[in-house]
Image (cartoon, helix red, strand yellow):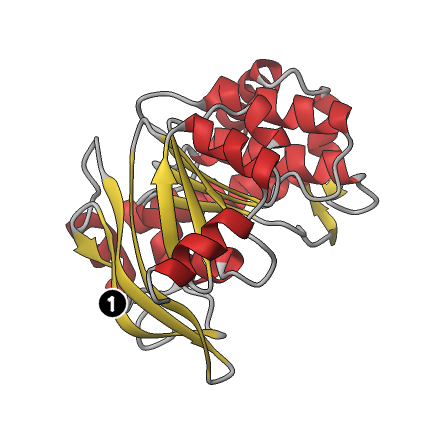
């Protein structure tokens, strides 16, 4: 057992995140391979809110999502990441997940030999045991019932649960598997890192419908995307634009439409006019 393993159940019970929790990014600076990528990001995402984060390639969007989840290759050099009033910077990725954060990957990896159902049952049991070390895990009949409920909610074929996770999946199936994970694990804040990447319009619509089905006052969503098209299906209340490692503009849904029509040049000119 690792030196920190004994701390985890105490940590999760101590920092049980309250309803209505917020993810707060405060003046976040992040380096990747000693190169500064994020240069003072400020953002608040609350449960029950949908935010979209847009920006050109290399602006730092995916760096932000990986830093929030604690990827070891992303070095936080300044700032704070607060979730439910708790500074999570010193927590491991699995600890952050068990507190109620979730990240849907841009490129989910395949795990041959591990079925979707077994993966999700182990993930769910890990959360249960973190909250209560005496928990014996969800019984198989109860888990099977839960899976059927969630898959029916998302209009997914039950045979999907018996397939090896992401092994031979199409792009759309990989993203639907991520949405199914959200449904089973019930996070409080979900980060969707370029979920629309590699999807055709039909697959994008199906995946978006799944996210919309799960959306409620208990779930806050941060949608990271290059393009406005996913926002035709997942409707954000707040839109933010990132350039050169900072959020330079925030607004409502009309901001995404303006960006789609006019591109980024007007923002670059605005930033240059501000002396940046």
Front-most of residues 182 and 146: 182
Q: What element carries label 1?
A: strand
Residue 273 image-quadrant placement: bottom left
- Judged from this view, the residue extending furthest toward the bottom is 34
Neighbours of disc 1 within 10 Å: few (<14), some (14-19), many (20+): some
Front-most of residues 183 and 39: 39
Vertical comparison of 30 with 148: above or below: below
- Judged from this view, the residue extending furthest toward the front is 273
Residue 156 horizontal side relative to residue 36, left or right: right
The residue identified by callout 1 is 79
Q: In the image, residue 138 lies at what x, y percent? A: 44, 34
Q: In the image, residue 220 lies at what x, y percent? A: 36, 33
**Residue at x 78%, y 32% (from the top left corner):** 200
Front-most of residues 210 and 168: 210
**Residue at x 44%, y 47% (from the top left corner):** 241
Q: In the image, residue 37 lies at what x, y percent? A: 46, 71
Is the C terminus in the top left, top right, bottom left or bottom right quadrant?
Answer: bottom left
Residue 177 horizontal side relative to residue 186, left or right: right
Is the N terminus in the top left, top right, bottom left or bottom right quadrant?
Answer: bottom left
Residue 53 horizontal side relative to residue 155, left or right: left
**Residue at x 76%, y 40% (from the top left corner):** 171
Q: In the image, residue 110 lies at what x, y percent? A: 73, 52
Residue 161 horizontal side relative to residue 80, left or right: right
């Amino acid at each position: 057992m690792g030196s920190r393993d004994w701390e985890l159940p105490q940590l999760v019970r101590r920092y049980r995140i309250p309803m209505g929790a917020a993810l707060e990014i405060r003046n976040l600076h992040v380096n990747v391979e000693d190169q500064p990528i994020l240069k003072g990001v400020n953002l608040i995402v609350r449960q029950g809110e949908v935010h979209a984060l847009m920006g050109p390639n290399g602006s730092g969007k995916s760096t932000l999502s990986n830093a929030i989840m604690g990827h070891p290759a992303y070095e936080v050099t300044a700032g704070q990441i607060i979730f439910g009033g708790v500074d999570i910077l010193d927590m491991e990725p699995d600890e952050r997940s068990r507190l109620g954060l979730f990240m849907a990957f841009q490129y989910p990896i395949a795990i041959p030999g591990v079925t979707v159902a077994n993966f999700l049952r182990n993930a769910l049991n890990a959360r249960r045991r973190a909250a209560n070390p005496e928990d014996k895990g969800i019984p198989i009949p109860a888990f099977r019932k839960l899976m059927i409920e969630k898959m029916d909610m998302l209009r997914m074929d039950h045979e999907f649960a018996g397939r090896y996770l992401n092994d031979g999946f199409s792009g759309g199936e990989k993203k639907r598997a991520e949405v199914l994970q959200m449904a089973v694990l019930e996070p409080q804040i979900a980060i969707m890192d370029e979920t629309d990447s590699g999807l055709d319009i039909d697959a994008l619509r199906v995946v978006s419908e799944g996210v919309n089905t799960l959306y409620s006052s208990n779930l806050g969503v941060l949608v990271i995307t290059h393009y406005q098209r996913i926002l035709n299906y997942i409707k954000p209340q707040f839109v933010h634009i990132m350039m050169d490692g900072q959020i330079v503009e925030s607004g409502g849904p009309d901001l995404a439409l303006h960006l789609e029509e006019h591109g980024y040049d007007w923002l670059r000119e605005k930033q240059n006019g501000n002396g940046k």
